[in-house]
Amino acid sequence: PGLQLASMAGRLTANSSIAQTARDILATWDGEMHPDSQGATIYTTLREHLQKEVFSKANEHLKSSVGLGGMLVQPGDDLLLMAFPELLQQLEARNDSWLGDSRSWDVVLNQAWERALEELVNQLGNKVEGWTFGHIHTVTLRHPLGVVPVLGKLFNRGPFPAKGDRETVCMGQITEVIPGQKVYVAPSYRFICDTSNWNNSTSIQAVGQSGHPLSRHYADFVRPWRNSEYHPMPWDRPYVEEATRDHLILEP
């Protein structure tokens, strides 16, 4: 979807040097959602405002919440996700009748573009080169006790610049599942199993092997997890002992 929208960058207005630079970056974007990508920032912001423009009459309902407590969700996010490919198809074809009113796709697209640029300037400044994805796309690893303000710095880790999006292979979706709090949705545990030799298997999870915040193993997997790296996941006892770095002994 990102590359499809980027291919239509020529239809965007460039009434300022900022708009021209941003349009050029979007037009030449490679589709990668890396933390240092400016194209990813411009695409995701434009996408959000484009959806708001197209579905302006339904925006209030799309933000409605369903459920209670930890099961609270906003179904509108999934509806927009499913509708976006069709939206892009109609935008590309300039099928104005699909909008259901007197607007044209070019008007809608450029209204979304202007509002996206305004948001990016207000949030990240006038230098488009500094509009990197990692500034707006971050992950904070939260401990249940981290919700207590005085304990947050001790138990939580982050925010960290994050990669990926809801359409990428390495998923990294940010959604407001709980109103007022952005939630990062990604594979928290990844593993690769070699069924011909289980000792060659590898895995990684988002934090560490220790639940004690003062342990050096409390968050030592954060960096490799963010970089899509892995650690050994051996099966047979000799290989387990070879890979072992520390022992935890629990006594009554």
Image: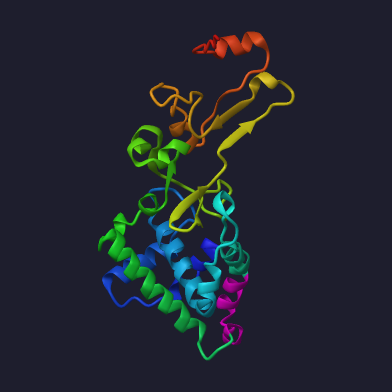
Image position of 16 with respect to 200: above or below:
below
Examine the rendering and report whether any part of residue 143 can be seen: no
Q: Which of 216/90 is in front?
A: 216
Magenta range: 86-99
Image quadrant where residue 73 sits: bottom right
User: Does residue 88 belong to the magenta stretch?
Assistant: yes
User: Percent x, y for residue 53?
Assistant: 48, 77
Q: Is residue 249 left or right of residue 22?
A: right
Q: Position of residue 145 (x, y in %)?
A: 44, 36
The C terminus lies in which quarter of the figure? top right
Asked whether the viewer can see residue 153, the reply is yes
220 left or right, relative to 64: left
Picture quadrant of residue 110? bottom left
Of residues 60 and 136, the one drawn nearer to the viewer in this rendering: 60
> Where's residue 54, x and y in %?
52, 77
> Is residue 48 magenta-colored?
no
The image quadrant that residue 49 belongs to is bottom left
Q: Is residue 36 above or below residue 118?
A: above
Q: Main secondary structure of the magenta part?
A: helix
In this rendering, the answer to whether 122 lies above or below 205 is below
